Amino acid sequence: MQIDLLDKFQGCLLGVTIGDTLGHPFEGKLRSEIYSYFDDFEEFRHNNRRLFRTYTDDSQLTLHTAEALIKGNGFNIDYFIREYINWLDDPPIGPGYGCISSIRKLKYGVHWKEAASNSGGNGTTMRIAPVGLFYSKDIKALKTTAIKSSIITHSHPAASAGAVVIARAIAFLIDKDPETGFSIDEFFDVITTSISNSQEEIWEEFIQILNKLKSNLNIPIESGLIKFSQAGVKSPYFIEQYLGQAFVHPYTISTVICSIFIFLKRLTSFKECIFELATAGGDSDTVGAIGGSLAGVYFGLENISPDLIKLAKDNKKILNISEELYNKYKRRY
Ligand SMILES: [Mg+2]
């Protein structure tokens, strides 16, 4: 089968927005609480449309990343900084501390090296999808761009590792056909290789957690989320009260691990996958956005139902930005 790459670009960015929109009302809630609201999520969504009216910072920053790549014809730090500063005028919806604090400093002219926060939060991974798409044919540039785009706001090594892993996963999935599937072994090989041999302790720890995830793929979603919700989180950031519960921590490693876990557990359809991601518990909107980028690029726009496309606010704008990014990519590769 011939893969339609424009369809994959559009599916990916729309996947971010749909996951973010569906997860937004559940941000900061335990998975057990979320599942007490409904027996059938589809029915709940139809009866509570007002809850799912907008996406949040995850999608906003993803779209600004896409704009920066389009305007700069690839990575150009000035366009990235400008686009992230423009985000302050959107205005930001539910931003994380790492992003908002550093981008405000950038706005006031502080050099990015001083402006970047030492946050290991998932704020840079949530916006990385366009980098994975644009550099899907140039893995070396994909990795350097994922890191460079990350350290503008987050100097913590976990943040850049998460960005590399998700960008690499997107590049892997872009030419896969959901009719025939893909090799889980190959998927893990590719993403762990993307951050191996780094001399960076946190990156090595990330690889170990990815290996642990791989050997735990057979456990049910609820148990897996309980196991990995706070993977890699260190004191004083560990949330004691949520120990033994499904509540995904906003730390990059735990968010990325849980997003990949749910994605791999629900390869049945875009809808099943995105519903499961958005109801993860804890940082649900970001799990929806990051996992949504994987589900979106894998299934492609053609496998996203019209009602879910309609759910994404500004869907026409998102489809247009995806197409512009695709056109830049096509001219370059
Ligand atoms: Mg958010």
Image: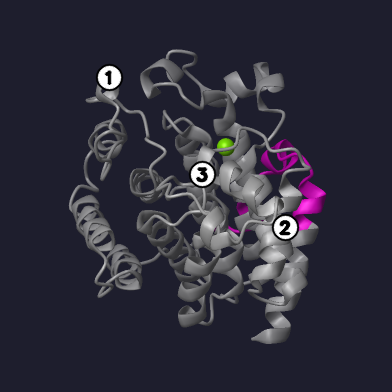
Which residue is outermost to the top? 36
The residue type indicated by label 3 comes to: Gly
Residue at the location (71% across, 40% down)?
312
The residue type indicated by label 2 comes to: Glu
Label 2 SS? helix
User: Does the magenta portion include 113?
Assistant: no
**Which quarter of the image is occupied by the N terminus?**
bottom right
Label 1 SS? helix
Task: Give how far apart the Cα atoms at labels 1 and 3 are.
Answer: 23 Å
Give the number of the mark in front: 1 or 3.
3
Upstream in the sequence, badge 1 or badge 2? 2
Q: Which residue is mark 3?
A: 98
Q: Is residue 312 left or right of residue 197?
A: right
Residue at the location (52% across, 38% down)?
97
Q: Which residue is mark 2?
A: 83
Measured as percent of width and height from the top left, residue 74 is found at 66, 76
Q: Residues within 10 Å of mark 1 (few under 14, many from 20)?
A: few
Circle count: 3
Q: Residues within 10 Å of mark 2 (few under 14, many from 20)?
A: many
Relative to the observer, which residue lies in front, 212 or 177? 212
Ligand 1 closer than 8 Å to label 2 CB: no
Magenta region: which residues? 298-319
Measured as percent of width and height from the top left, residue 279 is found at 46, 30
Q: Which residue is mark 1?
A: 241
Residue at the location (78% across, 43% down)?
89
